[in-house]
Image (cartoon, coloured by chain):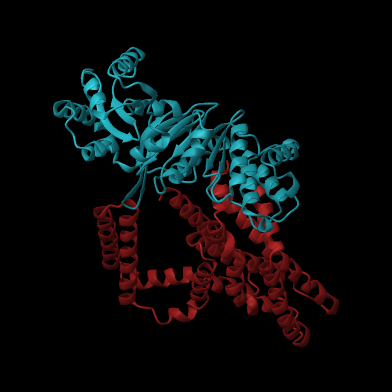
Amino acid sequence: MIEAKNLTKYYGSRCAVKELSFSVEKGQIVGLLGPNGAGKSTTMKMLTGCMAPSHGSVLVEGYDLATQPIKARGQIGYLPEEPPLYQDMKVGEYLNFVAELRKLPKATRKTEVETASKQAGVGEVMGRLIRNLSKGYRQRVGLAAALVGHPPFLILDEPTVGLDPQQMIEMRQLIQELGKEHTVLLSSHILSEVSAVCDHILIVSGGELVAQGTPEELQEQMQASGGLEIVVIGQEEVAKNALAALEWATILSISAENDQLQIVLEMPQDTQKKAELSATLAQAGCPVISMKERAASLEEIFLQVTQNPPQRIEEQPEQQEEQTKEQQEQSQQQTPEEEQNESDL
Amino acid sequence: MKAIYKRELASHLRGLVGWIAIAMLLFVTGIYFTAYNLQGQIPYFGYVLGSISFILIFLCPALSMRTFAEERKQKTDQLLLSAPVSLTSIVLGKYLALITVFAIPVAICGLYPLILMQFGHVPLLETYTTLLAFFLLGCACLSVGVFFSTLTENQIIAFVATVVVLLVSYLMNGLKTFVTGSQTGIVLFSVLALAAGALAWYLARNFVLGAVVFTVLELLLAAATLVKTGFMANALDALLDGAAMFTRFDSFLNGTLDLTAYLYLFTVIALFQFFAVQVLEKRRWS
């Protein structure tokens, strides 16, 4: 388990990472997600001991990185943003060097290097100079170096950056494969990557942790604000009047297309209420032809939590309540424009 | 440490710079050996070493410049920093590899007195103690070079800075004649005190601490000057002497075995290695 407590890093007077606390449980694939400059790389450098935090501490399997650095660092395989490769070495030589650097016993060194190179898929370039390798292979060699000696933790800083789409897919598969035997912490600014690969997501922005949880949890957190999207056939006025009878439902937006109406409602997400809604509309002569929960996609969550300053997120539930009240007071006499604005929020 | 030593040594011997440096040293040694020992018929090889010591000013920085500068530029330092090894062993591993490369031409130089033995009596003991001093002088220059290499990620800057420092050290005997007397001493030491104060201010980010350090040092200086006349001039002299690395080597040329010179060179080596580790440690924290 890697445990980061109140990690803070100042570059001069600029604060790159601020009071970041999280833990990476054994056996997880954890994604550190954030826009560029959010402090992802700095955090990873602090976790691997390349950089000391201004204050705060890191525990790796119970070893404090500040007081028992050698033991703590021995637990971690690190692939920095740019793979740290010596251009003038051959791949095999390089991996051997890393094995020796990581103090593997001489007897197991060769097999460890072979296993790591096989896992990372660099078996066929072992005799080639690193200088002559393509970007994709360099990334793999870097990964092989991180895997040498089978460290329980892998910290991968933007492992798919600079790869072509095919290589990206391969790298993701590889990481998922590795997740079975290692605990992996990877950083990325690509959301789809993290949601596809990771069990747990930490979203950082401006050096602070703004949200965390499994992809499903994050979606759930946002679902309350998502509302229900229904499509009915009928007149707008009729549908509005029918819905006005249901006091727990609030219309967020209505748009008409041909003879279909698309309505987004703010209402409790339970089956009973949905059935009631459906029945009410049907009685009014507006049959419901589709109904779906509009869950905020991870993309929306990401944008929401990283674009707003962290304080606003904490305030959000209140804001929403206020909105709901306002809407209730104003009842359904809103202009379409206002409705559009509300739904954008 | 062994892994780093082996990789570094292999890297030096794979590249061009290592071999060019070795060839340069042997070439210049060969010229002076021919002129002094063969044509001038002097049996003492030490004079050759005395005459070629200036070449270390350029040769050692050329060898040492890439030690850490290149690692930082290629970002390979992250591999070393995240590996389960201490900073001291990283610095020492690299430094020992440099010394090994430098030892190759010095070992070949060790053959010259044996050649001379074919033609008559050669003061072997004097020659080899001088050769050892020459080797240590080179190691001290390399240590200074390693230190400057940790400061920058540009090899050229590391090279130039090391050359300038070694050149000042080489010319210190001449420069000393310009800076003597109590007044210069007071100015120079005040500047040093100011630098110490500024360093304390920078490191601790505390202006008051820096000011206190500066004031205390100045008061100590004033007290020493008042209590003991001539203190300033003597201290200045000692300081400048301490910076003259190459002068220490010259004493061997008279045939004296100067143990304090060995000790002095070891101190220089240890001091700059220590500084190099401190710079790297500082970088981890900044």
Place residue B45 in its image quadrant: bottom right
Question: Chain B is shown in which shade?
Answer: red
At horizontal 43% and vertical 69% (from top left) the residue drawn is: B238
Question: Chain A is shown in which shade?
Answer: cyan
Q: How many marks?
A: 0
Measured as percent of width and height from the top left, residue A121 is found at 69, 42
Left/right placement of residue A337 relative to residue A32 reads left
Left/right placement of residue A149 relative to residue A206 reads right
The residue closer to the viewer here, B195 or B65, is B65
At horizontal 67% and vertical 43% (from top left) the residue drawn is: A100
The residue closer to the viewer here, A1 or B273, is A1
Q: Residue furthest top?
A: A272
Q: Is residue A28 visible?
A: yes
Measured as percent of width and height from the top left, residue A216 is found at 44, 26
The residue closer to the viewer here, B89 or A1, is A1
Q: Residue furthest bottom?
A: B39
Q: Is residue A185 above or below residue B150?
A: above
Q: Is residue A99 above or below residue B127?
A: above
Q: Is residue A67 visible?
A: no
Measured as percent of width and height from the top left, residue A76 is found at 56, 37
At horizontal 48% and vertical 75% (from top left) the residue drawn is: B168
Quarter of the image containing the C terminus of chain A? top left
The residue closer to the viewer here, B127 or A139, is A139
